[in-house]
Image (tube, rainbow, N blue to C red):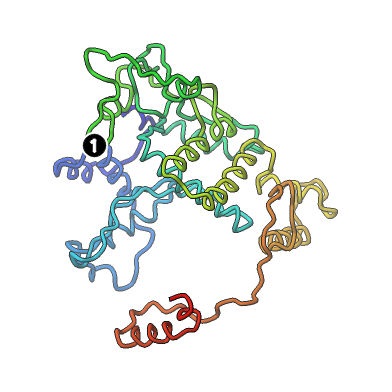
Amino acid sequence: NMYNDIPLPIDEEKYEELRKDGVDPALAQHIAHLFVRDPLVIFDGAVEEVDNETQTEHFESIQSTNWQTMRWKPPPPRNSPNDPHIGWRTEFRSMEMQLTDFENAAFTVFTVLLTRAILTFDLNLYIPISRVDANMQRAHGRNAAAKGKFFFRRHMAPLELGDDGYGVKYASMFSRAAKGDGSEDAESDNESVDDADDQSISDNRRFFPNAVGSIEENSFEEMTMAEIMTGKGDYFPGLITLVRVYLDYINTDAGTMNRISMYLDFIEKRSTGELVTPATWVRNYVRNHPDYKGDSVVSQSIAFDLLNTCKEIGEGTVHIPELLGDIKIDRITSDGAYETKLESKRARNKRTEELLRRYVKRSEFKTTA
């Protein structure tokens, strides 16, 4: 596999067992890699007591303690046919905790919407894993969000005739949209480039997801974070643009769109450097503290003041324009806090009926009924 381009230790015995039972090579290699070490966590009463025929605790004790930036998660077993089927999932795990609820909400909502856009528009974001590792190393650099460059896929759309992957001049669907050209590509060999199955997956995307037989380096290049988020040239629209297109595609209501637009505008300003990252703000805070001696030593007084200021930013009592722009955080107080423990036990029918009767007797319900 051209994307798994770095040495990967695997349990050869487990790999052969998985392949013998019909698991494809990529997934078999992934699982076999998990079993190169013993589990980090073992719970009392969940060793010999676990039935491997019906439970997955032993597998999850290894699976859940591999802390990668992405994690593939198989569905948990159902205790009965009527239990909900959670399905197969891919978990994004690379986001760092921000200082405010607004920032956390912005990046969380953006990530979820991006996953929906990837699925809906059948996008391909594959790059070799060695470039992913290089991106992580570059991300550790000072002011990397504003000044650094990262490897990213150039053409995310389903491959069509003439894609760089085939070594022929390429004009992507994004390029045609940017130029206002609504025409379709000519058919080749009497087959349309837009042929798709009943799940709307194009033939080119299904049969040539890796641009087989070509120079794969053509599929990705170095981009700044601003280019990754807002676009580059007429061939790469940017992730924020894709999210906006998706929101338009699903006919998002005006109220929701206004809120999400605040999140997207904020993320765009972070990517362009108009707003600094928490890392840059923390670095500047320490360097400008009166007790800092320029010797890379963070004293107790500096640490105390820094954490106290972080607390005040999160609570909305201090506003830092270079960090949040014109976003004002609503002040967080303990007034009106719900101090009753949230009950999760299922209510009995009799108790539910009593609550419903009390509810329908409320004056506001009678007025609007």
Q: Residue furthest right?
A: 290
Rendered view: 51 above or below 37 = below
Between residues 87 and 292, which one lies in front from this camera angle? 87
The image quarter containing residue 182 is top left
**Percent position of residue 196, x then y:** 25, 30
- Residue flagged by tag 1: what amino acid is it? Pro
| Of the pair 264 and 87, the residue shown nearer to us | 264
In this view, 216 is above or below 100:
above
Q: Could you tell me residue 202's position as x and y percent? A: 28, 29
Q: Is residue 94 left or right of residue 291?
A: left
Q: Residue at x 43, y 47 (%)?
A: 68
Count of numbered circles in the view: 1
Position of residue 95 measured from the top left corner of the image (x, y, whole percent) = 52, 49
Corner quadrant of residue 6: top left
Crowdedness near tag 1: few (<14), some (14–19) or many (≥20) residues, C-alpha within 10 Å:
some
Residue 22 in the figure: left or right of residue 283: left
Which residue is found at the position 44% from the left and 45% from the top? 251
Check disc 1 and report the residue beneath it: 25
Looking at the image, which is closer to me, 269 or 175?
175
Q: Residue at x 33, y 26 (%)?
A: 210
Residue 336, image x, y percentages = 61, 77
Q: Quadrant of the C terminus?
A: bottom left
Q: Nearer the viewer, residue 49 or 53?
A: 53
Q: Quadrant of residue 271?
A: top right
Above or below, comparing residue 170 to residue 327 in the picture: above
In the rendered image, which quarter contains the N terminus? Answer: top left
Q: Could you tell me which secondary element the residue under label 1 belongs to?
A: helix
Q: Above or below — where is 304 with respect to 16?
A: below
